[in-house]
Amino acid sequence: MPGGDARETGRTEIRSVLVANRGEIARRIFRTCRDLGVATVAVHSDADADAAHVREADAAVRLPGEAPADTYLRGELIVKAALAAGADAVHPGYGFLSESAAFAAAVTDAGLVWIGPPPAAIEAMASKTRAKELMAAAGVPLLAPLDPAAATAADLPLLVKAAAGGGGRGMRIVRELDALAPALVSARAEAAAAFGDGEVFVEPYVEGGRHVEVQVLADAHGTVWTLGTRDCSLQRRHQKVIEEAPAPGLPDALRDALHRAAAQAARTIDYRGAGTVEFLVAADGRAHFLEMNTRLQVEHPVTEEIYRLDLVALQIAVAEGQPLPAALPAPHGHAVEARLYAEDPAADWQPQTGTVHRIGVPDGVRLDSGLTDGDTVSVHYDPMLAKVVAWAPTRAEAVRKLAGALERARIHGPVTNRDLLVRSLRHPAFATATGLDTGFYDRHLDALTTTGADDAAHDGLCALAAALADAHGRSRFGGFRNVPAGPQTKEYARGDRTHRVRYRLGRAGLAAEGFPGVRLLALAADEVVLEVDGVRRAFALARYGDRIHVDSPLGARTLTALPRFPDPTARTEPGSLLAPMPGTVVRIADGLAEGDRVAAGQPLLWLEAMKMEHKITAPAAGTVTALPARTGQQVEVGTLLAVVTD
């Protein structure tokens, strides 16, 4: 680890760091700062006034407003905040302004230390098109961009990609030439809205490719470390879901070639600090440069786990001018990270909002979270709740450990992708590393989100446990009766399924319809113990309003208690398209108006929520009889957007 007394070496000593970010990465950086004895300063929007990163910082400065464009993307306000709070350095985290050369220059011009690469290095890689030109001149292999006007059927499939930014924004896969022009228009609009830069380019789309990246770390003294590889192929909407290090199954020659190319990329732009060089490895084993992220990556923990390093501490040391040791540390074992999102994979990855009542994982795995119990998932920001990371001596052990920890985690709040993560990790194509490529979810999502007979049986037991616990909590006699009583009936929903529980408790114990061989062993408001076919099963229960979270060794379930008498007014006109989430109407299909005929599946409008665009399509062929939605309109869940009458 770099070290030394700054007073003796003449190097800069950082004593207070402002993190120009929020959520998980802000808390992650604060954790290292506390370990180093460095003071911390947070910035926050009005929506984040009581966020975990604000509560944990030594000082915090308000950025008036809620939307990122008014707050975390206002570099001049953040520089003023750093000066006002007495910080002497700024760490950008990832996302927001982390890859803005102008912001990095503004920080240094204000006399503050920038914990990141030089502005010139950021600028060199800011545009993917210019970065490709630079890397081609340096001899780094890559996919050459295509002129969209000259594209032919022989060039298909194609990828339209935003020149600026990242995170999957402004990307479209084109498989038919007729779809290229609309994809260019759509990608430009999304890129302009997300990054303030509507430039896009077109390149060949590699089917079945793997997303492999190399972590680099460089100092101001000429040392460049390449800290192994990471595989980030499991993605949804071009955003990563599961990452691991080292990338499994790479031939030694390919791995060495990736390390050399990454080091060459860093040296070409005189890089300093932490960065990541990303490659697409085709099925034929050839690697192509994609881009260089001039910042810390979301998935950096897997590299930290196998190298036993703190990359944030190293970033700070490099920013202070300290040299890296000449010798690379040796890697050990394997690490896998899963991103826990508040989203519903079975409903087109629809993001979710609401209060996270509880989030916790078993001992033995790492949890990097942006919130704590009781915090709220806001519509304004990315839906990632946390990253769960497991390390073990071998890949198989790390995958099993992570899947088990996610299954036993207590996550009470909005719908999450937890079940998908567990099933993905246990899928044979992933577990054996034989099906790792960016098309994993295109092939397997339906199977990974389909409810089977075992799931239905488990749901039923959870519903029974919920009904028994509810009766116990409402009865001062504990639910048992010494006199005959009529059967009790409760209904619970999970997804599109309704579970009706009908049971009786008396001197003979539990008698529940549809549950032969089930005995009640213990009953409390927060735990029910059942014997199922001779096997003891414990179900822990927590209730928040009409939602009941049931955790057991069989897995976690979230049920919604249904009212005995549904509200007859809770109906909408047939064909009504309601907003599935809070968000902003960013686009309406060109020329769409009331009275127009539309086809089933035809896009009508687009909502933006939690850094993603969501397409609202016609549910069936028909006529648009109402179109109250307007571009720029802020909508809540259930807002009427359009009506299509068959």
Image: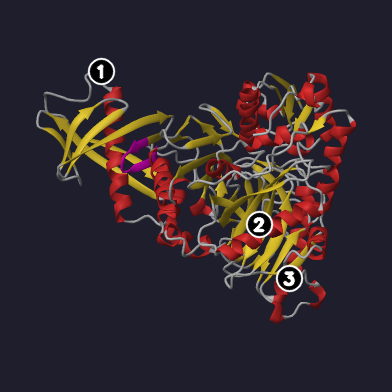
Foreground pick, 107 / 228 = 228
Asked whether 552 falls inside the magenta stretch, the response is yes
Instruction: Check disc 3 and report its element: helix, strand or loop.
Output: helix
Q: Is residue 519 above or below residue 290?
A: above
Query: Label 3 amino acid?
Result: Leu
Location of residue 251 (image quadrant): bottom right
Front disc: 3 or 1 = 3
Instruction: Name the spot of residue 206 as percent of width and height, x first.
Output: 63, 69
Foreground pick, 244 / 224 = 224
| Residue at (78, 72) in percent of width and height | 146
Q: Quadrant of the C terminus?
A: bottom right
Which disc is residue 180 wearing?
A: 3
| Residue at (78, 47) in percent of width and height | 271
Give the main secondary structure of the magenta stretch. Answer: strand
Q: Is residue 441 above or below residue 153?
A: above
Label 2 and label 3: CA atoms lie apart by: 35 Å
Left or right? Give the position of 218 relative to 416: right
Foreground pick, 234 / 540 = 234
Asked whether 558 falls inside the magenta stretch, the response is yes
Q: Do the residues labelled 2 and 1 touch (CB within 8 Å)?
A: no
- Of marks 3 and 1, which one's residue comes earlier in the chain? 3
Instruction: Name the spot of residue 27 as percent of width and height, x first.
Output: 62, 30
Which disc is residue 442 wearing?
A: none
Label 2 and label 1: CA atoms lie apart by: 67 Å
Query: Label 1 amino acid?
Result: Arg
Which disc is residue 476 wearing?
A: 1
Instruction: Check disc 1 and report its element: helix, strand or loop.
Output: loop
Which disc is residue 259 wearing?
A: 2
Region rendered in magenta: 550-560
- Of marks 2 and 3, which one's residue comes earlier in the chain? 3
